[in-house]
């Protein structure tokens, strides 16, 4: 290759890199609604609409994201599930409360993520390629006012599922929930089955099942958490945290998940631990939905081939 050819090639690669960076900054603000159908309800039931939101990582200046999240209430979901990492700045409580306001009028459940507890910090992105991407923070973490966030959601009637169980009556059916606190900070403790908060232990007068659906909720989908929820007989598990890999390879998908979940499950609807329950070989699996989320760390505000998202899950009879 001649010197001029090498220079042109180098210039082309540089232009491609600059273009990719520019696009990733745009894509990080190109919010989209995903939709999926989950055949998980008992026979004969009407569909149940579940809005799954996650990883907003909201900062005070993100007015467009606030407006977009508020519009999600127009989907008229029967249930809102928030799987954590709602904010990314100490001054975000007001904008976040405004964003969630119309959704808080609906039945909902929530768990906390790591950035609900502590503010994000700049970190070396190469650590995500390690088997365990967690690392000691470069400086003492700043605590977020997470108790205010918990009070906001609880006061609206949303169930706090951080290492807890609960039950809701939704559109004529009874749904039980089990959740864990954030596994990325090792705060997860699966609550024991059979206790007073486990609606499945209540004796039905007719001997029929006391709940129509059992749902597991967590922020970070570490394998130990998913295995615990599977053993708890969850019909459907909802999680976030992964950002869908955040930077994906077109035609291939995510390279990392920021936990020990395999990258092919970084976002979307899957089976756990094997194939989808409605696919060959999936009889021992449960349904798993991982949200790619709506935000990024303020120190890495980019996405590539992985648009920020919320998901409307339509649950139908199996």
Image: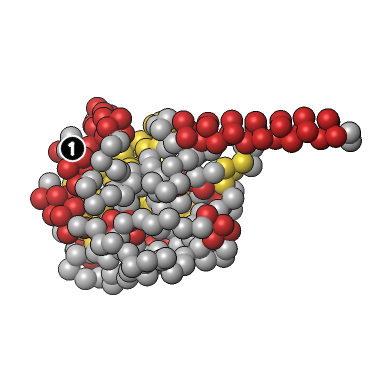
Question: Residue at image x 71%, y 30%?
Answer: 12
Indicate the quadrant where residue 167 lies: bottom left
Sort mark 1 into few (<14), some (14-19) or many (20+) by Cα contacts within 10 Å: some
Q: Nearer the viewer, residue 90 or 234?
A: 90
Looking at the rendered structure, the number of numbered marks drawn on it comes to 1
Q: Which residue is labeled 1 in the image? A: 98
Q: Nearer the viewer, residue 283 or 167?
A: 167
Q: Could you say where residue 16 lies in the image, as x and y percent from the top left?
A: 65, 32
Q: Is residue 218 above or below residue 79?
A: below
Indicate the quadrant where residue 63 lies: top left
Q: Which colour assignment does the render follow? A: secondary structure
Question: Residue at image x 44%, y 36%?
Answer: 28
Whether residue 214 is visible here, answered yes or no, is: no
Q: Is residue 17 above or below residue 281?
A: above
Question: Residue at image x 50%, y 63%?
Answer: 133
Q: Nearer the viewer, residue 243 or 88?
A: 88
Under circle 1, the secondary element is helix
Q: Could you say where residue 50 lies in the image, as x and y percent from the top left?
A: 31, 40
Q: Could you say where residue 293 lies in the image, as x and y percent from the top left?
A: 39, 43
Question: Residue at image x 24%, y 58%?
Answer: 144
Residue ranking furthest to the front: 3
Q: Could you say where residue 312 lies in the image, as x and y percent from the top left?
A: 35, 36
Which image quarter holds the N terminus? top right
Left or right placement of residue 71 versus residue 137 in this view: left
Indicate the quadrant where residue 187 lies: bottom left
């Amino acid at each position: 290759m001649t010197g001029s050819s090498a220079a042109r090639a180098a210039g082309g690669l540089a232009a491609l890199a600059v273009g990719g960076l520019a696009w990733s900054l745009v894509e990080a603000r190109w919010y989209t609604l995903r939709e999926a159908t989950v055949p998980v309800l008992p026979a004969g039931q009407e569909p149940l609409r579940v809005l799954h939101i996650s990883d907003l990582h909201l900062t005070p200046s993100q007015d467009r994201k606030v407006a977009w999240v508020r519009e999600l209430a127009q989907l008229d979901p029967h249930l809102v599930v928030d799987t954590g990492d709602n904010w990314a700045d100490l001054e975000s409580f007001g904008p976040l409360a405004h964003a969630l306001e119309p959704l808080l009028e609906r039945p909902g459940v929530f768990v906390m993520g790591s950035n609900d507890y502590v503010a994000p910090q700049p970190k070396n992105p190469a650590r995500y390629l390690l088997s365990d991407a967690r690392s000691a923070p470069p400086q003492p973490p700043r605590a977020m006012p997470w108790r205010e966030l918990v009070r906001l959601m609880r006061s609206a009637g949303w169930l706090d599922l951080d290492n807890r169980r609960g039950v809701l009556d939704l559109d004529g059916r009874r749904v039980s929930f089990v959740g864990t606190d954030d596994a990325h900070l090792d705060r997860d403790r699966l609550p024991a089955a059979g206790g007073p908060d486990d609606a499945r232990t209540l004796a039905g007068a007719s001997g029929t099942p006391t709940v129509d659906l059992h749902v597991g909720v967590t922020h970070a989908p570490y394998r130990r958490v998913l295995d615990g929820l599977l053993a708890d007989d969850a019909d459907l598990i909802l999680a976030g945290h992964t950002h869908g890999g955040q930077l994906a390879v077109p035609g291939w998908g995510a390279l990392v998940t920021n936990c020990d979940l395999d990258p092919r499950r970084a976002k979307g609807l899957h089976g756990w631990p094997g194939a989808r329950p409605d696919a060959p070989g999936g009889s021992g699996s449960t349904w798993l939905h991982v949200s790619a989320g709506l935000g990024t760390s303020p120190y890495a505000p980019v996405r590539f081939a992985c648009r920020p998202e919320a998901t409307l899950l339509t649950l139908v009879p199996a």
